[in-house]
């Protein structure tokens, strides 16, 4: 291995023999003065050796002084120590620079993650607001459908009982034929209910749930009580006590009666006010098992679905 003549000269200028300097350069890979000095310092106490220099080629015109031990002056030791200190300082500076770069990258990544999270939360907030607005509009339409359906059912019951049927001020029959008696109207002339009874039931329950959002226990208790009424009639429609409810009953008032939507729900199931409005009564011939089954399904959903009525206004 050929040694670098410039580094060889620098080592000789430091007081090393040419053979020793050449051996140090060859042993340290001929890489730098610092590596060669480090090798010399590390092998200061080595015994003299007559072995040839490492490497595939034999150095030409270099005689290794094998008869003398390696002698290193204090000046060389100080120089080596200085070079080692400089190397450590450079490594420390490099490590500090890498640490700063890593910290900058960590901060930048953190900012990007925070911004992405903020944008996701803003998008979700806008979606919820839009959903809530749509739910409010749908609930408003549903309540109007319920009101019209209840009015239509009332007129139908009066017709079946042979009572005069009053035209409600809010219902526009839009019939092309005018009657001579403004207090009588044919129920067939009323507009058809656009929503199914099941949809009306669902809206009653959603409204009741939202009105009691600060005390969910009251809504759950009302749903459970309504479910009991519905199941009792469904299982035994011939039992009269299941089809008649005293409105003034304290238990009924506490659980259902104090909520307008609770009474509306029972009316949608076929119950109607009788005896001066003191009772809710479901006539045997008006028992609709398929309607009661739908009512039970809606109540079960309201009781088990944690998101039921979440966005109602």
Image: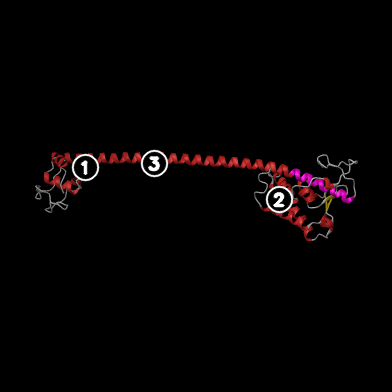
Picture coordinates of residue 21 (x, y %)?
A: 14, 45
Of residues 79 and 260, which is closer to you in this image? 260
Q: Is residue 232 something that shows in the picture? A: no
- Mark 1: few/some/many CA within 10 Å (<14, 14-19, 20+): many
Of the residues under marks 1 and 3, which one precedes in the sequence?
1
Mark 3 vs mark 2, CA separation in Å: 55 Å
Which residue was labeled with disc 1? Answer: 34
Picture coordinates of residue 14 (x, y %)?
A: 15, 39
Q: Residue at x 76, y 57 (%)?
A: 290
- Mark 2: few/some/many CA within 10 Å (<14, 14-19, 20+): some
Picture coordinates of residue 38 (x, y %)?
A: 21, 45
Of the residues under marks 2 and 1, which one precedes in the sequence?
1
Q: Is residue 148 magenta?
A: yes
Q: Farthest residue toward the front? A: 176
**Label 3–label 2 contact, CB within 8 A:** no
Predominant secondary structure, magenta span:
helix
Which residue was labeled with disc 2? Answer: 220
Element type at mark 3:
helix
Element type at mark 1:
helix
The image quarter containing residue 124 is top right
Mark 1 vs mark 3, CA separation in Å: 30 Å
Q: Residue at x 69, y 53 (%)?
A: 301
Span highlighted in magenta in the image: 143-161
Which residue was labeled with disc 3? Answer: 102
| Number of numbered discs | 3
Picture coordinates of residue 25 (x, y %)?
A: 17, 46
């Amino acid at each position: 291995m050929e040694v670098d003549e410039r580094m060889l000269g620098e080592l000789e200028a430091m007081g090393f023999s040419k053979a020793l300097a050449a051996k140090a350069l060859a042993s340290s890979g001929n890489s730098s003065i610092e590596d060669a000095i480090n090798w010399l310092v590390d092998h200061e106490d080595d015994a003299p050796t007559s072995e040839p220099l490492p490497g595939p080629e034999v150095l030409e015109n270099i005689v290794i002084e094998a008869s003398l031990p390696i002698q290193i002056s204090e000046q060389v030791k100080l120089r080596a120590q200085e070079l080692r200190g400089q190397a450590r300082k450079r490594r420390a500076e490099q490590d500090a620079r890498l640490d700063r770069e890593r910290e900058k990258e960590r901060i930048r990544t953190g900012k990007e993650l925070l911004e992405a999270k903020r944008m996701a939360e803003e998008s979700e907030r806008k979606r919820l607001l839009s959903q809530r607005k749509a739910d409010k509009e749908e609930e408003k339409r549903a309540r109007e459908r319920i009101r019209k359906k209840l009015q239509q059912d009332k007129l139908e019951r009066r017709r079946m009982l042979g009572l005069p049927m009053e035209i409600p001020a809010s219902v526009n029959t839009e019939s092309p034929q005018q009657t001579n008696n403004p207090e009588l109207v044919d129920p067939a002339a009323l507009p058809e209910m656009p929503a199914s009874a099941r949809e009306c039931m669902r809206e009653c329950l959603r409204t009741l749930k939202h009105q009691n959002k600060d005390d969910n226990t009251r809504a759950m208790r009302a749903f459970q009580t309504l479910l009991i009424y519905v199941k009792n009639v469904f299982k035994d429609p011939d039992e009269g006590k299941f089809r008649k409810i005293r409105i003034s009953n304290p238990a009924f008032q506490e659980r259902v009666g104090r909520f307008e939507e609770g009474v509306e729900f029972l009316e949608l199931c076929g119950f109607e006010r009788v005896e001066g409005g003191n009772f809710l009564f479901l006539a045997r011939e008006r028992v609709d098992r398929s309607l009661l089954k739908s009512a039970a399904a809606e109540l079960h959903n309201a009781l088990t679905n944690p998101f039921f009525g979440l966005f109602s206004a």
